[in-house]
Image (cartoon, rainbow, N blue to C red):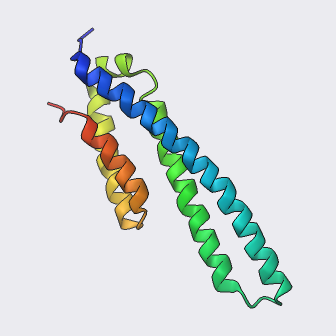
Amino acid sequence: MHRYPSNLRAKILTTYQDILIALEDAKKLSRAAGMNQRNAVISHVNSKYTQHENVLEKSKICEDLFFRIKILTALSEKLKDPIDFLSNHLKYKQMIQELDVLIIQSVQSENYETAAILKKCRDTFLEPK
């Protein structure tokens, strides 16, 4: 097994912990956003369907949070066992490429907070050779 430098392993562990914290925060925000969306729908119905824009706004917030949770969950799964992960150089390259694609997709869909989380994670890793 190829041993990667201990400072890289430490960065990966720190990044993994940061991702878990961000994931828990996103889940809390998602629960609150879900309640806000529910309340918006109830208000929309009670107002005889005059608050459609408010429902759309709350739905967009929920969709963005669900996307962020999906990304953070996928990242945490990829980094769950960093030492074994780093022993396979092809998976390491693939992870870097996937992060780059996800960053671009997040920016294109205007999920800037998610893009920032992904960029921070991406910046942690060395460029694969």
Image quadrant in which the N terminus is located: top left
Q: Quadrant of residue 86?
A: top left
Residue 29, x across and y down, in percent? 61, 55
Q: Residue at x 50, y 36 (%)?
A: 20
Q: Residue at x 25, y 24 (%)?
A: 8
Image quadrant in which the C terminus is located: top left
Residue 100, x across and y down, in percent? 29, 48
Question: Residue 129, relative to residue 27: is it above or below?
Answer: above
Looking at the image, residue 76 sits to the left or right of residue 41; the answer is left
Question: Residue 59, relative to residue 129: is it above or below?
Answer: below
Q: Residue furthest left?
A: 129
Q: Residue at x 68, y 58 (%)?
A: 32
Q: Residue at x 35, y 63 (%)?
A: 107
Res 128 visible? yes
Task: Name the residue nearer the viewer: 23 or 103.
Answer: 23
Question: Residue 44, relative to residue 110: is it above or below?
Answer: below
Looking at the image, residue 25 sits to the left or right of residue 90; the answer is right
Q: Residue furthest top?
A: 1
Residue 4, x across and y down, in percent? 23, 17
Q: How many marks?
A: 0
Res 88 visible? no
